[in-house]
């Protein structure tokens, strides 16, 4: 998998006493245009990819960039963070953070 675009500024240090300390030494940034999810009783799996087609009439092809498996609790936390981040984006308002 190759990274696309400039890498964001490294933000591995968490504020004092809050949140995890991220090791971003293996970080790759991708811009996903399509995401799907499946689940079992023990995990949620999210596939993220980019789409392309050779012509308007051809079937859409998806290049899988990442498959992320997580526990249901982690998926719930992601759901809650996205629920806070998406409405301001849709409204064009100030950007919120997902750190909580």
Image (cartoon, grey):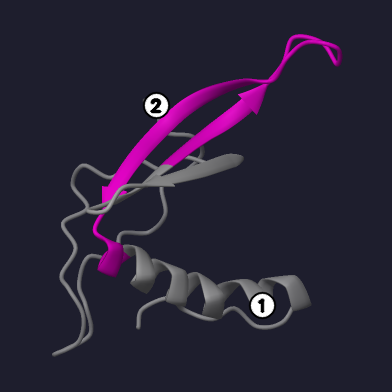
Checking the image for residue 2, the label placed there is 2
The reply, left or right, for residue 49 in relation to residue 55 is left
The reply, left or right, for residue 88 in relation to residue 47 is right
Which residue shows up at 51% across the image and 39% down it?
A: 5
Q: Nearer the viewer, residue 16 or 81?
A: 81
Q: Please identify the quarter of the rendering in which residue 60 is found.
A: top right
The reply, left or right, for residue 23 in relation to residue 92 is left
Is residue 39 shown to the viewer in this render? yes
Q: Residue furthest front?
A: 41
Residue at the disc numbered 1: 87
Check residue 67 for magenta coloring: yes
Q: Give the magenta part as a residue range.
A: 47-74
First along the sequence among labels 1 and 2: 2
Q: Secondary structure at mark 1?
A: helix
Q: Nearer the viewer, mark 1 or mark 2?
A: 1
Q: Please identify the quarter of the rendering in which residue 71 is found.
A: bottom left
Q: Secondary structure at mark 2?
A: loop
Q: Where residue 16 appears, x then y in whole percent?
A: 16, 89
Which residue shows up at 22% across the image and 65% down it?
A: 12
Tell me the crowding category of disc 1: few under 14, some 14 to 19, or many 20 or more residues within 10 angstroms, Cα based: few
Q: Residue furthest bottom?
A: 17
Q: Where residue 3 appears, x then y in whole percent?
A: 41, 33
Q: Nearer the viewer, residue 73 or 61?
A: 73
Q: Where residue 81 appears, x then y in whole percent?
A: 45, 75
């Amino acid at each position: 998998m190759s990274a696309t675009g400039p890498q964001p500024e490294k933000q591995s240090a968490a504020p004092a006493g809050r949140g995890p300390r991220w090791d971003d030494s293996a970080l790759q940034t991708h811009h996903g245009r399509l995401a799907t999810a499946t689940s079992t009783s023990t995990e949620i799996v999210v596939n993220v990819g980019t789409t392309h087609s050779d012509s308007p009439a051809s079937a859409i092809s998806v290049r899988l960039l990442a498959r992320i498996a997580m526990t249901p609790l982690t998926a719930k936390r992601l759901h809650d963070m996205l629920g806070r981040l998406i409405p301001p984006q849709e409204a064009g308002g100030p950007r919120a953070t997902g750190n909580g």
